[in-house]
Amino acid sequence: RAAVLTPDSKGVVTGNDFLMNIPHVGPWIKLNPGMQEAVIRGNTFHNDRPLDQRSPTEMLILVETGGRLSSADSSLRLIENNLIKGFPFAVWARGMKTVGQPGGFIVRNNVMDGSIRLEGTREAAAFMAYGNLHATTLQEIKPESLDRLPAPLPPVEPTPQDEADTAS
């Protein structure tokens, strides 16, 4: 079920334990670009389904800025202190073209076994990602940075189970 968000909407997801073990084809958490502020802090996200049974377009968190903010407003997305396991594509932050102040993304101090992608121009977004550690090696994860206006999201691809069900 979708929520209608106004430009001054704020969203907070804190202190939860999530086990994602059903077939899914897109982002598990998608934050509307029109939201004023969003915080994802202190959660545990775990997906133990084998990768060969999952959609290649599955990801955990998709956050975007842009939307209908006034010229004086900016938006902030804060993702910190989470444990994220079982998601090869953990966080995708997208700074869309905005009117007014650029949106801000802070991705810090998470432990994960997946990747972080930061996409957007300096005019559209300010990005900061640091202190994110790989869950197995404890090495710092360097985000993939794409200095461009985000392209449309790729179309979702079905899971192998969905394809088998459709074929039968």
Image (cartoon, rainbow, N blue to C red):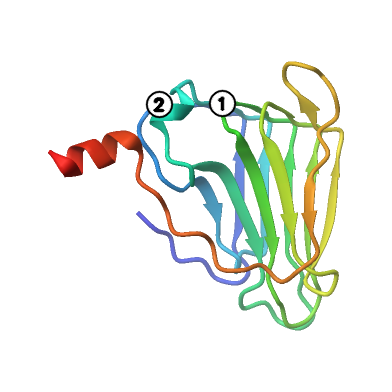
Q: Which element is circle 1 on?
A: loop
Real-space CA distance between mark 2 and mark 1, rounded to the nearest whole angstrom = 10 Å
Crowding at label 2, few (<14), some or many (≥20) Cα neighbours within 10 Å? few
Q: Secondary structure at mark 2?
A: loop
Position of 52 with respect to 161 (left or right) is right
Q: State the image coordinates of residue 103 (x, y, percent, origin top left).
A: 76, 66
Counting every numbered tag in the picture gives 2
User: What residue is shown with label 1?
Assistant: 86
- Which quadrant of the structure image shows residue 88? top right
| Quadrant in which the N terminus appears | bottom left
Residue positioned 42% across, 34% down in the render? 54
18 relative to 145 in the view: left or right: left
Q: Nearer the viewer, residue 164 or 106?
A: 164
Left or right for 158, reference 50:
left
Q: Residue extending furthest front?
A: 167
Q: Can residue 20 be seen by looking at this rendering?
A: no
| Residue 90 percent across, percent down from the top left | 63, 38
> Which numbered tag is attached to residue 167?
none
Q: Residue at x 27, y 40 (%)?
A: 162
Look at the numbered discs 2 and 1 and tell me whether their residues touch, using CB distance below 8 Å: no
Earlier residue among tags 2 and 1: 2
Looking at this view, is 82 or 37 the one in front? 82
Report the front residue among 147 and 132.
147
Name the residue beneath numbered marker 2.
21
Amino acid found under the numbered disc labelled 1: Gly
Residue located at (56% from left, 26% from top): 86
Left/right placement of residue 25 relative to residue 146 reads left
Q: Amino acid at mark 2?
A: Asn
* Residue lying at 43% horizontally and 28% vertically, measured from the top left: 52
